[in-house]
Amino acid sequence: MRLRAIERGEGVPALAMTHGLFGRATNLATVQKRLAERRRVLALDLRNHGGSPRAPGMTYPEMAADVVETLTSLGATPCDLLGHSMGGKVAMTVALRHPGTVRRLIVADIAPVRYRSEFNAYIAAMRGMRLFPGMTRADADAALALVAPDPSVRGFLAQNLMTGREPRWAVGLEEIAAGLYDILDWPATAGVFEGPTLFLVGGRSPYVREEHHAVIRALFPAVRFAVLPEAGHWLHADDPDGFVAAVERFLG
């Protein structure tokens, strides 16, 4: 599957970026613009998100194949690859299953493990929400309050509402709902990625814990870890300066 890609900058090697669940390429616009001052940077909408096609199947091998097909078609391989959250699992899968595609790997605040999540409740609320002409994202935010007490989570989900005379969700809710088990899981993957790897972690996030380090090192033996102390899970939004600085140090 060819994915929608937003490109900035120029130069080789390219840096490709993949977003998290219910995100889109534009969530990474601030850091993309700054990183593109020195290189070509491509931000991708993963399948069933943003402007990319809708299709059944949300397994990591499927999403990784989409990324490889898209970057190859754009002449952007081998590249440096950065992924956040779900996109970090996609990036890890690309590196492990298509190692010739990736030079250096950056994984932002996710580990190669299975997670539990509140997303079942979020998806049910979004699927059950009545959309009406003139509906605003504030209306969607209010409707999500019962299942998402954190206003930052509600805002993140509500940004997927395309407003207007016929409001609609800019994500494939049905496909994501059907594939949520696979999204939360981590696929069994043989082999390792020997290339330089950075795990960039939010200091206020519970997603990457000390007990995850062993499995990370087993798959990515050339790994380094860096922490943004004041950032949570959305570390590129919480601390864009620290995020860009850490990425640029790693990429040289």
Image: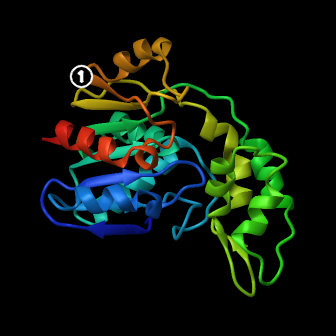
Q: Residue 140, how many percent across, how many down? A: 76, 64
Q: Quadrant of residue 74?
A: bottom left
Instruction: Please indicate whether residue 85 sits to the left or right of residue 5 in the image.
Output: right
> Which of the colour schemes (rainbow, by chain, secondary structure, one colour) is used?
rainbow
Other-residue count near label 1 (Cα within 10 Å), few / some / many at <14 / 14–19 / ≥20 = some
- Residue kind at label 1, given as amino acid type: Ala
Q: Is residue 233 above or below residue 188?
A: below
Q: Is residue 197 visible?
A: yes
Q: Look at the image and tell me whether residue 76 can be seen.
A: no
Q: Quadrant of residue 100?
A: top left
Q: In the visual, does 120 lie left or right of 204?
A: right
Residue drawn at x 87%, y 69% as measured from the top left: 130
Q: Secondary structure at mark 1?
A: loop
Percent across and percent down for residue 217 are 35, 17
- In the rendered image, residue 237, in percent from the top left (x then y), is placed at 45, 49
Please state which of residues 201 and 142 is positioned toward the viewer in this rendering: 142
In the rendered image, residue 142, in percent from the top left (x then y), is placed at 80, 60
Q: Which residue is disc 1 drawn over?
A: 222
* Quadrant in the picture for the C terminus: top left
Which residue sits at x=74%, y=58%? 174
Q: Extreme front residue here?
A: 230
